[in-house]
Image (cartoon, rainbow, N blue to C red):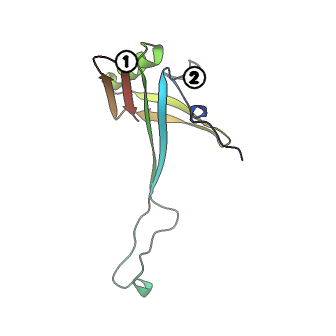
Amino acid sequence: MTVQTGSALLLKMRKDSRFPYETVAGLRTQSLTFNANPIDTSSADSASRWRTFLAESGMRDMNLQGQGLFSNAASDLMFRELFFSGGHLNMEIILPSYGKILGQFAIAELQYLGDYDGEMSWRIEL
């Protein structure tokens, strides 16, 4: 397997199924985290006092973070609209050599940043 560039991890979004996915504009940094929370069934009488878990159970979730340059593009506007309306983003996440992940994400945090002598940027957590 060859080494992949960070820019190959693509984030695309759309309002709903009537529109095609479009790449998030100005994105510089992105991260994708998968989490699993198994159901602990341990008790005082567990075998050899080891923790035990319920097979094939628990909750899984995915966390997506990104940071980029504010360019007043359509994706910047969509982030703002969906944050204030409480809507969900339809996302397509492209992981090179692995495939695509499709799903709806809620915006947990939307932040705008800017130094007086630098560019304006944004940060989002889904």
- The one nearer the camera, 114 or 122, is 114
Going by the numbered disc 1, the residue's amino acid type is: Glu
Mark 1 vs mark 2, foreground winner is: 1
Q: Residue at x 35, y 79 (%)?
A: 43
Q: Nearer the viewer, residue 92 or 114?
A: 114
Residue drawn at the location 44% of the way across and 74% of the way down: 52
Q: Position of residue 100 (x, y in %)?
A: 62, 37
User: Looking at the picture, which amino acid does disc 2 mark?
Assistant: Tyr
Q: Is residue 114 above or below residue 65?
A: above
| Label 1: how many Cα within 10 Å (few below 14, some 14–19, many 20+) | few
Q: Where is residue 37 shown, x and y percent of the image?
A: 42, 58
Disc 2 residue crowd, few under 14, some 14–19, many 20+, Cα 10 Å: some
In what quadrant of the picture does the C terminus appear?
top left
Residue at the image point whose x is 37% and y is 18% from the top: 119
Give residue 89's quadrant in the image: top left
Rounded to the nearest whole Å, what is the CA distance between mark 1 and mark 2?
A: 27 Å
Tell me which numbered mark, 1 or 2, is placed earlier along the sequence.
2
Q: Which mark is residue 47?
A: none
Reading the image, the residue beneath label 1 is: 119
**Secondary structure found at label 1:** loop
Residue 125: x and y, percent? 38, 35
Numbered tag placed on residue 21 in the rendering: 2
Query: What is the number of callouts on the image?
Result: 2
Are the residues at dot 1 and dot 2 in contact (C-beta closer than 8 Å)? no
Q: Secondary structure at mark 2?
A: loop
